[in-house]
Image (spheres, helix red, strand yellow):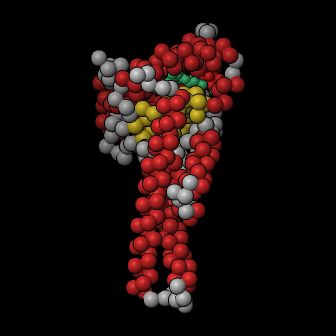
Amino acid sequence: MSWIREGELTIIERFCANIIKAGPMPQHVAFIMDGNRRYAQKCHVERQQGHSQGFDKLAQTLRWCLNLGIREVTVYAFSIENFKRSKEEVDGLMDLARQKFSRLLEEQCFLNVCFAYTSRHEISNAVREMAWGVEQGLLEPSDVSESLLDKCLYTNNSPDPDLLIRTSGEVRLSDFLLWQTSHSCLVFQSVLWPEYSFWNLCEAILRFQMNYSALQKARDSYLEERRQQEMERDQAYVTMKLQQEGFVSHGDSRRRQTLLQKCTAMREERIQGFLQALKHKRADFLERLCPVSA
Ligand code: FPP
Ligand code: MG
């Protein structure tokens, strides 16, 4: 029996879920599950118990998300900063992860777990990968763009989160998905993570729904601007080529059109080649990190 799929909503929860589902729903929700230690302190239990209950809450929340038709969830399970905590706590969290990860992997993969992660590290790594691509001759410097950086992030297979929720009353992102959440609805809730309820999730979704059209508008206008910028970049490249060929001003329009198509196709080909090489490079790295025994 699936561990996430166990458990149904109550009648009243089902009723409210159906009402909420009549509005626009977030397809991808990210969580900063904060407040485990404060919860442990409040309940006079061991810190590890707070983290363990935090994990159980994650399982329950995933069940609610499935019931609400949310297709993808991303959680901040452990930041690089968390390594600065006491050895005892870090070891405890690692043990918890070891015990629970195999169970998580058995589930249908709509969950992304960010472990030993920070966003600035992810972004600078993506920049380094693009620099490597240029160094290897796989990319031209002008291929480096925001859309290529998107593709070099660890999250390249997922759409950006529509909604990001942080619990425990902290109102900061703590280096989580900084690039990916610039057009997401950010909801900060005061509840401690182990006490998170179905109703807290509904409240966050309602806030997303109230802001839906403004969020969509901002995202669409950003994408349009980006498309425009990329077109201008290709136009500038073609103008330079035409000038090199001795054409003055804007040159012959048919020649310009042909060059533009050629430039776009070649850029696409270089980018695909680079992404393929990057995929192999990352697979090799993972293979060296945790070799699969023969
Ligand atoms: C934040 O609370 C929580 C964490 C640093 C760990 C998050 C981990 C879990 C919810 C369980 C483990 C999950 C997996 C996938 C194995 P905090 O420790 O910062 O508490 P505080 O804000 O009250 O100090
Ligand atoms: Mg905290």
The N terminus lies in quadrant: top left
Q: Quadrant of residue 40?
A: top right
Q: Tell me: residue 246, above or below residue 109.
A: below
Q: Report the front residue among 205 and 3.
A: 3
Identify which residue is drawn at 66% across, 13% down.
88
Residue 7 on image: x %, y %: 33, 19
Identify which residue is drawn at 56% across, 83% down.
244
Question: Is 228 on the left-hand or right-hand side of 8?
Answer: right
Identify which residue is drawn at 36% across, 25% down.
107
The C terminus lies in quadrant: top left
Q: Quadrant of residue 106?
A: top left
Residue 4 on image: x %, y %: 36, 23
Could you tell me if residue 87 is visible in this image? yes
Q: Quadrant of ligand 1?
A: top right
Q: Report the front residue among 38 and 260.
A: 260
Q: Tell me: residue 93, above or below residue 27.
A: above
Residue 43 on image: x %, y %: 59, 11
Question: Is 59 on the left-hand or right-hand side of 132?
Answer: left
Q: How many marks?
A: 0
Could you tell me if residue 218 is visible in this image? no
Q: Tell me: residue 183, above or below residue 233.
A: above
Residue 24 on image: x %, y %: 37, 46
Question: Is 136 on the left-hand or right-hand side of 105?
Answer: right
Identify which residue is drawn at 47% across, 48% down.
277
Q: Tell me: residue 52, above or below residue 287.
A: above
Find the residue positioned furthest to the front. Answer: 294
